[in-house]
Amino acid sequence: MGVKKVAVIGAGVSGLGAIKCCLDEGLEPTCFEKRSDIGGLWKYEEKSKSGNPGIYKSLTCNTSKEMTAFSDYPIPDHYPNYMHNSKMMEYLRMYARHFGLLKHIQFQTKVCSIKKRPDFSSSGQWDVVVETGETQKTYIFDGIMVCSGHYTEKHFPLQDFEGISKFQGSCLHSWEYKHPNSFAGKRVVVIGIGNSGADVAGEISRVADQVFLSTRRGAWVWSRVWDHGNPMDASLFTRYNRAVQKFCPRYLINRQMEKKLNARFNHANFGLLPQHRILDHRTVLSDDLPSHIITGKVKVKTNVKTFTSTSAIFEDGTEENIDVVIFATGYKLTFPFLSDDSGILDSQYSMFKYVFPPELEKPTLAFIGILQPAGAIIPTSELQSRWVVRVFTGLQKLSKKAMMADINRKHQADKDAIKNLKDSSRRVQFIDYMDEIASEIGVKPNLLSLLLWDIKLAKEIFYGPCTSYQYRLQGPGKWAGARAAILTQRERILKPLRTRVVKHSRASLSHLFWVKSVCVVSFFFISVLVIMHLTNLYLQTRHVQMVPNMGLFGGLLEENTVPRE
């Protein structure tokens, strides 16, 4: 294809990964970042500027460090499992310095437009117009990686709330919120119960007279801390759990997960119980919200029906005097540098695997990190970039027919989800999506092979956290440190917690022994099933049936009869 020069738009977490992936494949990346620093969303600014991400001073990662790290650069072991935004910025700076990324970034440079060149159908090249200060310049690039994120254009639906124009208090979006000081002694209503809404309501409630959290549908609320004090995502996002989920009926998974969250606090008693099941909509992560509710500092309310000059009237008929309204109503996905008539994207932003627009004659434009995984964004966007640069360099080919078939299947799934009142907007299952992209590249870990040659590693990959290092064990971009990173990931989880060393009691050691024993026995059993399954397949090719057909994870109750010679 001849792609050599690549424009990367944005120097956030996805943009940094894209630059590094370009360098790994021998490409020449130029990154355009409209701010004066890297970090994107994680770069805190005291006053948010239009078109830039906006975060509050206390923002902390919702994903733990081992699940968040780049695949060939683990986060330092002494860093906390859930990092404050300042710690995340330190990590990104270390990553950028280690791989020499900063020299490829043009700061304070805004991308004004990207357009196909007149000979695009043969060259696949783009005209990129950028602006620095008041000076515009046009570049020609062979490929473009859009890493601008989707937290820049706030969704501010004032028109949906009757009487808001009469309200004499102040209105703002959570994008503008920085710290709680200015809300001391005030009565505040927060509209929306996403992660930001829960965080902002809880933080303000420490100084406000009263906070009301208004929600249309409620939410299931998780905590960062899971059983035995382990990080929630590192405990749940394992290949073992995913295998169980695939074989269990959806209603059983819903029931078990809801039971688990209700054991922490009863969602119905706290006014948060939603009508939807837990797997059907995005959930909320908040350690403190239940505490603020039980102490009365936050009161959960229904949706606001109308505003008066000094109060909010809710759909349940209650009325509360308020001073401030904060809209935690999310963001809109926009690409201001793409004109509406460019024909690059349709109104639904249809993309092959959320990366490649299917209608282009040449696949030289890719969107990175424009999705919402049920997990960390860095591992997913990094895999996307690794895939994209291989397509750019012609090492992998895309078929328009296959792309359209995949997109149509996704559109049908979205329609079914909407019909069943499920949330489908660019959500992907964390492990499934990473495996899907990794399969395109050829870097998905081969458990069957590892079972035979490295059972210790195979056990950790199957039962342990599904971390990004797994996708550096083999294939293009293989990293020599991947195995060690996987086998030491639990040590890095524990390191920042053990600031006061204590001796384990006999009881805790005994419990640990039995847990390990159960894991080893179950892993051995699964290994036997897999080996028997492979043996059976081999024997079938020889027209001999000597053992029951096992299936990959079972099938013991049903024996196939195979004709014998």
Image (spheres, rainbow, N blue to C red):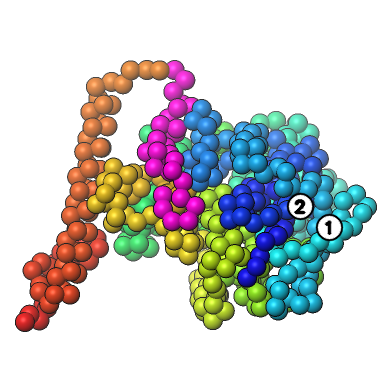
**Relative image position of residue 289 (x, y in whole percent):** 56, 40
**Residue 32: which numbered mark, if any?**
2
Q: Can residue 278 be seen from the camera position used here?
A: no
Q: Secondary structure at mark 2?
A: strand
Query: Could you tell me residue 152's position as x and y percent?
Result: 74, 53
Residue span colored magenta:
473-500
Judge left or right: residue 308 versus residue 252: right
- Horizontal placement of 125 versus 97: left or right? right
Q: What residue is at 20 percent from the left and 48 percent from the top? A: 524
CA gap, disc 2 and disc 1: 8 Å
Residue at (13, 75) in percent of width and height: 542
Answer with mark 2 or mark 1, whichever residue precedes in sequence: 2
Q: How many marks?
A: 2
| Residue 493 in which image quadrant | top left
- What's the residue at 25%, 37% (across, down)? 516
Residue carrying label 1: 130
